[in-house]
Amino acid sequence: MSSLCPFAGAATGGGVCPVKSDKSSAGVCPAKSDKSISGVCPVTGKDHGSEHKESTGHAEDKGTDPRMVPAKCPFGYDSNTFKLGPLSCIICQALLHESSKCKPCAHKFCKACIARFKDCPLCGADIEGIEPDTELQALVDRFIDGHARIKRSHAGGDVEAACGKNKVIYEDVSMERGAFLVQQAMRAFRAQNIESAKSRLTMCADDIREELKSSEDNLDLCSQLGAVLGMLGDCCRTLGDAPSAITYYEESAEFLSKLPTKDLELVHTLSVSLNKIGDLRYYDGDLQSARNYYARSLDVRRNAVKEHSAVASQVIDLATSLAKVADVDRNLGNGSAAVEGFEEAIQCLQKLKLDSKQANLEQRRVSVLDFLHNQLADK
């Protein structure tokens, strides 16, 4: 999924996306997320794990015997690090989607999650059958509609209510409504419950669209919607629905293109969306269309390097885009253009000097450089 938190622009204070980080959760932002997905929230930019630490720190100081080592669950479910809400699935750690009950033990999970098991993950009993729990799912849906959907102030309505109740308090954290939905989506996506992730992201996108009707020029909303649409594209791509994925990626690129290109995160997200469309066109055999999208992504990255020539990651991204365009040129029969593209990419990476603190970038630079040399050797 995308590396940008859709709600980061609206963040208050911190710089982390609730969809990315939340030590005590499993969510990510869309595009970056928490421990397992990334580490920051798309809506607020806060690290919610730190909030939990603050609230429990004093109690630990007073009541903990320094000679005792507290019990810790190897899977992260101990009381000090994780609290699972009553409406969540213990497998994907997201809100229940298509709630289902195991027979005969009656433990409840998401349908897609429990379908992969033969024994109940909670009690170990053999699963003889699975049946929908419509009553529990109705409760989850009511919770989402009443507490998790992004609230909008209506003309002449109670603006104070809209502004004062814009947070969701669930499990051991409090976060903004849009961030909460994206966090739940990213948890589900990470656990391969793609339909659940898609459902939550669709709700979030619908709410942002409603807000845009009254403020079409709101750049923060355009940024959020662009990121969420990109995540929806990732869901469709994972499900094998390439046409829908392309539609979402194109719409994402449309909204992100309206934004100033000075924000490197937005530049990265826009160029990645364009490249993903190019990839899908490429795999479908439409090489000319693929080249057009790769070239658009290349233009975005060229402009970014002009503005931020000292940012090493941008230079590596530029070299990657040059390689994509060159590869398509070669497949289209334009060998000379392909060689020029590969050589320009090599020059970019050879000029790039990294220090010892940038080991990850250096590893990436060397990997791309090796690929480019191999492409020229095969010409």
Image: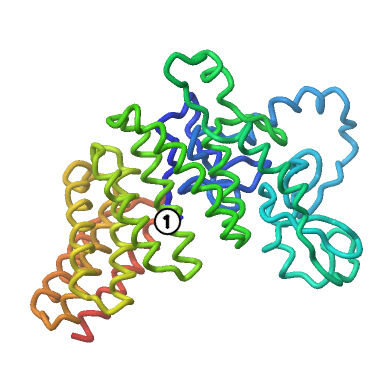
22 or 256: nearer the viewer: 256
Q: Position of residue 208 (x, y in %)?
A: 43, 37
Q: Position of residue 83 (x, y in %)?
A: 75, 40
Q: Residue at x 49, y 60 (%)?
A: 235
Residue 119, relative to residue 332: is it above or below? above
Image quadrant of residue 332?
bottom left
Q: Position of residue 34 (x, y in %)?
A: 58, 46
Q: Give amino acid for label 1.
A: Ala
Residue 96, relative to residue 295: is it above or below? above
364 or 241: nearer the viewer: 241
Q: Residue at x 8, y 78 (%)?
A: 336
Would residue 98 be found to the left or right of residue 177 on screen?
right
Image quadrant of residue 56?
top right
Would residue 372 be found to the left or right of residue 30 on screen?
left
191 or 96: nearer the viewer: 96
Q: The C terminus lies in which quarter of the figure?
A: bottom left
348 or 83: nearer the viewer: 83
Q: Residue at x 74, y 64 (%)?
A: 114
Residue with the mark numbered 1? 359
Would residue 289 be found to the left or right of residue 89 on screen?
left
